[in-house]
C-alpha cells in the first residue's frame, strides 16, 4: 500500500499568520486573551490554543478594557471592531489578507452604488464579516440556481468567499449576467484554496481512496471532500487519526491524502504515521 500526500496540504498563509499572532499574544501579554469565535476551524488546534491561555468567546459583551481580543482569520464586521475599540480592548487583527481584500472591494462596490453579491455561504463567519462592509445590503448566493429568484437590477458587483470553488463562482457569475446591464466581478478566491482544490481533484484521479483531513466545521475542508467525492473515488473526511477505519483501506493499493487550510501538520503526520506505508509527495 502506498500513500500520496498532496503537495498543498495543511495550513495556508492566512492561518499560519493567525496562529503566529495568537501565540505571540499568549507569550507576551499579561492580560486575558480571547478570540472572537474559534481562531481557526479546527477543534484540536483550538484546544491547543486554550492550553496557552487563548480562550474563545462568541461575543465581546463580557470583555473588559485592557483585555486582548484576537480577530480570527475569517475577519469580522466594522460594527464589532468599532465596539471593541470603544470598550478599550487591545485588538490583535489576524484577519487573512485575502479576506481583507474581499472586505475592501465589497465596501467600495457598495459605496459606488453596485448591488453587491457575495458568492458564498450565508452563515459562514467570513461572509457575515464581508456583509458588514456593505452595510448588510449584499445578496449572498451559494449556487447558481438561486440567481433566478433575484430581482433584476442595473449594476451588480461580485466578490467570492475566499474558500469557494472556482467552478461554483463561475457558474453564479454566468447566471448573474441575465440579471443586470452592468456586471463587475472580482475573483477573491485565495490562491491557497485554488491550489488545494486543483491538487485534490488531480490526485483523486490517480488513487483508489481519498482521505481528507480537517475540521468538520471547516468550509474549505468540506469543499475538498465534496470535490474528491464528485470525482467518483471513495472519499472519507476525518478530523483525527482515531477516525480511520481499516475497512476503508481493505484491498487498496494507493491512498491519496489531502488536508484543509486550517489543518495543522501534526494531525496530518499522525494519520500518515498510522498508515505506515511509503509516503510520497504528489506533483
Image (cartoon, rainbow, N blue to C red):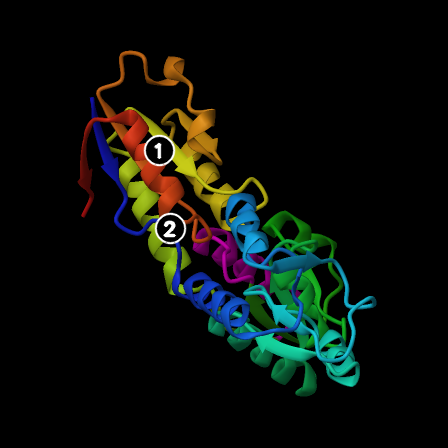
Q: Residue furthest front?
A: 30
Badge 2 crowding class, 10 Å Cα cut-off, few under 14, some 14 to 19, many 20 or more, is many
Instruction: Report the front residue among 229 and 36.
Output: 36
Examine the image and state in which quarter residue 159 appears. Answer: bottom right
Q: Which residues are magenta?
A: 161-181
Compared with residue 168, is residue 155 higher up or lower down, i.e. above or below? Answer: below
- Give the residue number, with chain letter if any, for mark 1: 271
Q: Position of residue 79 (x, y in %)?
A: 76, 77
The structure residue drawn at horizontal position 50% and vertical position 49%, both measured from the top left corner, is 45
* Element class at badge 2: loop
Q: Magenta part mainly helix, strand or loop?
A: helix
Say left or right for 119 vs 136: left
Instruction: Report the front residue among 154 and 97.
Output: 97
Asked if residue 173 lies in the magenta stretch, the reply is: yes
- Give the residue number, with chain letter if any, for mark 2: 10
The structure residue drawn at horizontal position 50% and vertical position 69%, both measured from the top left corner, is 27
Say left or right for 262 vs 51: left
Q: Position of residue 168 (x, y in %)?
A: 51, 52
Are the residues flagged by discs 2 and 1 in contact, CB closer than 8 Å? no
Asked if residue 17 lies in the magenta stretch, the reply is: no
Q: Position of residue 253 (x, y in %)?
A: 21, 20
Report if residue 67 is visible in the image. yes
Q: Residue furthest right?
A: 61
- How far apart marks 2 and 1 lie (CA) works out to 13 Å
Q: Earlier in the sequence, mark 2 or mark 1?
A: 2
* Element class at badge 1: helix
Instruction: Report the front residue among 165 and 250.
Output: 250
Compared with residue 24, is residue 120 higher up or lower down, i.e. above or below? Answer: above
Compared with residue 170, is residue 278 higher up or lower down, i.e. above or below? Answer: above
Amino acid at each position: 500500500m502506498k500513500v500520496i500526500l498532496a503537495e498543498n496540504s495543511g495550513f495556508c498563509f492566512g492561518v499560519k499568520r493567525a496562529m503566529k499572532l495568537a501565540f505571540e499574544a499568549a507569550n507576551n501579554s499579561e492580560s486575558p486573551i480571547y478570540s472572537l469565535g474559534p481562531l481557526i476551524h479546527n477543534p484540536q488546534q483550538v484546544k491547543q490554543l486554550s492550553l496557552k491561555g487563548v480562550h474563545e468567546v462568541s461575543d465581546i459583551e463580557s470583555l473588559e478594557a485592557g483585555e486582548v481580543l484576537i480577530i480570527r482569520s475569517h475577519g469580522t464586521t466594522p460594527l464589532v471592531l468599532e465596539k471593541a475599540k470603544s470598550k478599550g480592548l487591545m485588538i490583535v487583527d489576524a484577519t487573512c489578507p485575502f479576506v481583507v481584500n474581499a472586505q475592501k472591494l465589497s465596501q467600495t462596490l457598495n459605496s459606488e452604488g453596485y448591488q453587491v453579491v457575495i458568492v458564498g455561504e450565508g452563515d459562514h463567519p467570513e461572509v457575515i464579516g464581508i456583509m458588514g462592509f456593505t452595510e448588510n445590503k449584499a445578496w449572498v448566493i451559494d449556487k447558481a440556481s438561486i440567481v433566478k429568484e433575484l430581482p433584476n437590477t442595473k449594476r451588480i458587483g461580485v466578490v467570492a468567499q475566499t474558500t469557494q470553488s472556482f467552478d461554483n463562482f463561475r457558474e453564479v457569475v454566468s447566471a448573474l449576467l441575465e440579471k443586470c446591464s452592468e456586471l463587475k466581478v472580482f475573483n477573491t478566491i485565495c490562491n491557497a484554496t485554488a491550489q488545494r482544490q486543483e491538487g485534490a481533484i488531480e490526485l483523486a484521479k490517480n488513487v483508489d481512496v481519498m482521505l481528507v483531513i480537517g475540521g468538520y466545521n471547516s468550509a474549505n475542508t468540506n469543499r475538498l471532500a465534496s470535490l474528491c467525492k464528485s470525482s467518483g473515488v471513495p472519499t472519507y473526511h476525518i478530523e483525527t487519526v482515531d477516525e480511520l477505519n481499516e475497512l476503508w483501506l481493505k484491498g487498496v493499493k494507493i491512498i491519496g491524502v489531502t488536508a484543509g487550510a486550517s489543518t495543522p501538520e501534526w494531525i496530518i503526520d499522525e494519520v500518515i504515521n498510522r498508515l505506515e506505508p511509503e509516503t510520497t509527495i504528489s506533483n
